[in-house]
Image: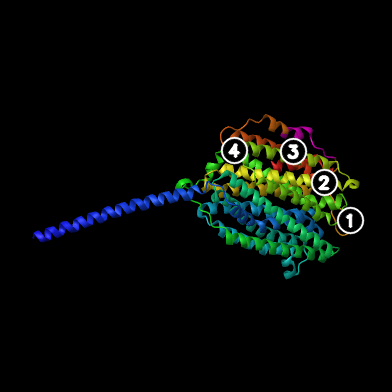
Amino acid sequence: MWRFALLDLHVFSLSWRLLELLSRFGVAVTKALIMGTIIEDDSFTKPLGRWPVFYYGMGHMLNDITAACWFTYLLLFLTDIGLSPRDAAVVMLSGQVADGFATIFAGELIDRFGHFKIWHAAGSILVAVSFSSVFGGCLPCKIFGSNSKTFETASYSAFAAIFNVGWAATQVSHMSMVTCITLNSTSRVALASCRNAFTMVANLSLYGVALILFSVISGKTYAGVENQYRWIAYLSILIGCCFVGIFHLATKEPRLKVGVHGSVHARISWVYWFKRVLYYQVALVYVLTRLVLNVSQAYLAFFVINDLHMAQSAKALVPAIIYICSFAVSIALQEIAWTGRRLKAYYSAGCILWIFCGAVILLLTRNMSYVMYIVSVFIGIANALMTVTAVSMQNFLIGEDLNGCAFVCGSLSFVDKISCGLALYVLQSYQIQHMIFVKTYRAFFPQRGFVPTPVEIEPIKCVSTAPRNTNGPFSYKVRFGSCSCIMCTGWCGSNLHYGFQQPFKIFDSTAASLAVCSST
């Protein structure tokens, strides 16, 4: 019996030692895992390398190159093939409304389920398929043999809606990835700046393709116009898809649920954002910035061709100059270590430049059309300053609340799309049609517009009187100052954009009031 007792004691001793060893091993493993998590999560607060930033910027190329064509040439294309300005605006508005609602739903679903890259890929496929259908002519009209303008408008509107749904899914997934890739504020600005730089590459690619095709293919007939834009669409899709493919191969899926030092964030309700005053301030900054850029881009081709009577190549050269300058400024902005004070200063500088450019354009006459090339340089600089800093303000709003990033991006884009669509519809609805040569429309308004002096002075006043930030990289006071600047610039921009219609310096004051209401 004593032998069995000794054996039991020996087994117990071995078991105890084994448990002790396992315990020590478990502690060591746990410590290693904890340290690994901390090290891994600490890497999220360190600056990103150049290559991850570079690959991320490629992801929005397809959206950017198609959006450049959409806002620059859609209204011109639709009116050139026979649609009235109001019908063309209906097509644009249907796409913007679909984009707005799709943005909200995409943001909510991405916050729930994650999988940024899946959403990005699905949206890119929709964009590629539907974009060629919009600029490739009315396919349903050919299938059903219909010549009805109403049916044609409805067909274009349907494809416009599909295109914008895909565009929204790609945009929200790509923008919301920024806050989940890194927690470093400077790297977030670098990602936004690189994204903006590739936007410039996309636009330059589009205008380069357009310049060649407008020179090679005649656009004197409806068939010729459709052929021009069909090839522009095909080549744009090809270029964009190449960059999107590189993005998916080189960029890893970011983690949505893990925050600093391995802490897991609970999903944030949308009500949380609506209770923050800061959310509305940043929303106003972002929305009015996009309104200034998109509406001016939409009427730029009308202005240089129909009002200044510049050569056909100007509708590609002038936008190209704008985006070359924006590209250069965006590259320079990547090298800056950002603080709230610098965001405020650079954003305000962009506002002032836009007001300066608008004032010059209001005084521009046909015999001074060459000045437009000079003004384009300053417009490009202003666009880059405003875009990079506005998107960065959005990222500062999100901060470390990663599980609400998609909703923030989606909701802001929703207001952006709806306001832009309404503004374009109001502007187009006030046009009076004139038949000149081959169905060219010119706008006329009975009163001359002007730039109010207080609007030009107010952004400078905001910069000089807004309090300095003392509570972090982007404090409440700094955001408020920037918000005030864009409010003034957005109001001024709404008036200035009438200049991109024909004749440039004339618009109806009632129409201006409606446009300002729709933009604010």
Q: CA distance from mark 3 to mark 4?
A: 21 Å
Helix, strand or loop at label 1? It is loop
Secondary structure category for the residue under label 4: loop
**Residue name at image x 37 percent, y 51 percent:** 30
> Of marks 3 and 4, which one's residue comes earlier in the chain?
3
Q: Which mark is residue 474?
A: 4
Cα–Cα gap, marks 2 and 3: 16 Å
- Toward which corner of the image does residue 237 lie, by quadrant? bottom right
Q: Tag 4: residue type? A: Phe
* Label of residue 352 in the image: 3
Residue in the foreground of this view, choosing between 4 and 316:
4
SS category of the residue bearing label 3: helix
Which picture quadrant has residue 234?
bottom right
Q: Which residue is mark 2?
A: 374
Crowding near the residue tagged with mark 1, few <14, some 14–19, many ≥20 C-alpha atoms within 10 Å: few
What is the x, y in percent for residue 153?
Answer: 74, 59
**Nearest to N terminus: mark 2 or mark 4:** 2
Across and down, in percent, residue 310 comes to 87, 53
- On screen, 285 above or below 53? above
Q: Nearer the viewer, mark 1 or mark 3?
A: 3
N-terminal-most mark, 2 or 3: 3
Could you tell me residue 112's position as x and y percent? Answer: 51, 53
Name the quadrant of the N terminus: bottom left
Q: Is residue 7 left or right of residue 51?
A: left
Tell me the residue at 54%/54% (across/down). 110
State the image coordinates of residue 147 (x, y, percent, origin top left). Answer: 78, 65
Dot 2: within a 10 Å radius of its alpha carbon, few (fewer than 14), some, or many (20 or more) residues?
Answer: some
Residues drawn in magenta: 448-459
Number of the label disc, if any, that sits on residue 436: 1
- Asked whether residue 379 is drawn in magenta, I would say no
435 or 414, nearer to the observer: 414
Q: Amino acid at mark 3?
A: Ile
